[in-house]
Amino acid sequence: MGALALLNDAPTIGDAVQNMSFETYWREKQRLIEKRLEELVPSAEIEPKKLHESVRYSLFADAKRIRPVFTMAVASLFRVDESELLDCACTLEMVHTSSLILDDLPCMDGATLRRGKAANHLVFGEDTAILAALFLLNRAFGILADYKRSLFGPTLPVQFVSILSRSISSEGIIGGQIVDLASKNIRIDLETLEFIHSHKTGALFIASAEMGTAFAKVREVERQAILNFAKNLGLAFQITDDILDATADPSTIGKDTGKDIGKTTFISFCGLDGARQLANELIDTAEQSLRPLKSRAELLLSFAEFVRHRTK
Ligand code: IPE
Ligand code: IPE
Ligand code: MG
Ligand code: MG
Ligand code: MG
């Protein structure tokens, strides 16, 4: 089967993944993550059915799963069995999905399309959508609290809880989202824009890196290299998201476009070409920060190239 035929087989990560072995790697991890997520949330047959249906509707829609795949990739560089990190990886996807459900609400971005389907609140109502998002957040912490203590002892789960909690807090997604919402229809400076991007999106990429390095007990110099990589990658990921909002087609990216009109983005600051250049520079910086990893950097470099070229 040729590369294109494979790429047309959803779930997709877009046609930006040109490296076949990386694509196979990603697909394999995506499959494991989705299978485990299936087990970690209640079936839609279990009461309250409407809540569980709403949770599953958003969680199992077509999505890239970049954060959980990335955390497993980080751990895999250090001769540990990264499959032991699967539940932890799933919590990153739950938190992310929760943030998308909330982000789409009329009181936030007022979006209609998400992951190729009608936004959660349009199908289940705003009340259920909010509860589904809260369910996912709460379940994520429950999973971490139960983390295979028999194998890892009590310290690692507490570390995971602390990392995840910080990434959602005012130092993370919630902090970024509130400043983002307050910045509609006003001009903001570059520093505020960087704050928004690095918090609303960057923080969960950093948490993904932190979980992977904590699990693998990585040496400090390598840990810092990976955290710097994640920081720049997360920022570049949001800039490329803004570029797609301005240039892509909803049928390709599976969500509304033009939602950033009236908002200050890197595109309104430095134009489309300038935003592309900035994303490229951040990706270059991310790649350079991996130098201490030497040949082990290869897998993570593929993530960076994915973000550089992504079309969804
Ligand atoms: C979308 O995230 C929201 C941002 C933080 C830019 P993704 O582009 O990872 O969306 P999914 O998970 O693949 O749907
Ligand atoms: C939001 O950024 C990032 C989140 C924390 C959900 P956007 O509002 O640009 O994300 P999309 O474009 O709706 O996915
Ligand atoms: Mg938003
Ligand atoms: Mg949005
Ligand atoms: Mg966007």
Image (cartoon, rainbow, N blue to C red):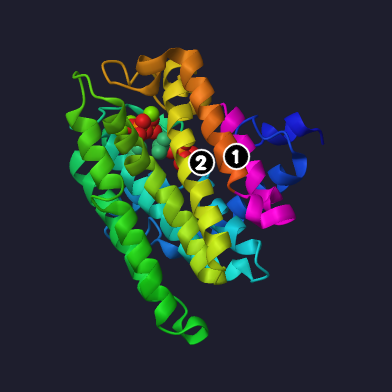
Q: Across the whole image, how many numbered discs are drawn on residues?
A: 2
Q: How far apart are marks 1 and 2 (CA)?
A: 7 Å
User: Range of the magenta residues?
Assistant: 290-312
Where in the figure is residue 69, as x and y percent of width and height?
56, 52
On the question of residue 59 being in view, the answer is yes
Asked if residue 36 is positioned above or below residue 291 in the image, the reply reads: below
Query: Is disc 2's CB within 8 Å of ligand 1?
Result: no
Where in the figure is residue 230, as x and y percent of width and height?
50, 48
Which residue lies at the image location 72% right of the left edge and 36% below the top edge? 6
Which residue lies at the image location 52% right of the left edge and 34% below the top edge? 282
- How many residues crowd around disc 1 within 10 Å: few (fewer than 14), some, or many (20 or more)? many
Q: What element carries label 1?
A: helix
Which image quarter holds the N terminus? top right
> Is 217 displayed left or right of 245 in the figure?
right
- State the image quarter where residue 2 is shown: top right
Q: What element carries label 2?
A: helix
Which residue lies at the image location 33% right of the left edge and 43% below the top edge? 199
* Residue under numbered circle 2: 233
Towards the viewer: 91 or 224 = 224
**Residue 109 colored in magenta in the image:** no
Badge 2 amino acid: Leu
Q: N-terminal of the two: label 1 or label 2?
A: 2
- State the image quarter where residue 221 is shown: bottom right
* Residue under numbered circle 1: 304
Where in the figure is residue 140, as x and y percent of width and height?
36, 62
| Dominant secondary-structure state across the stretch colored magenta | helix
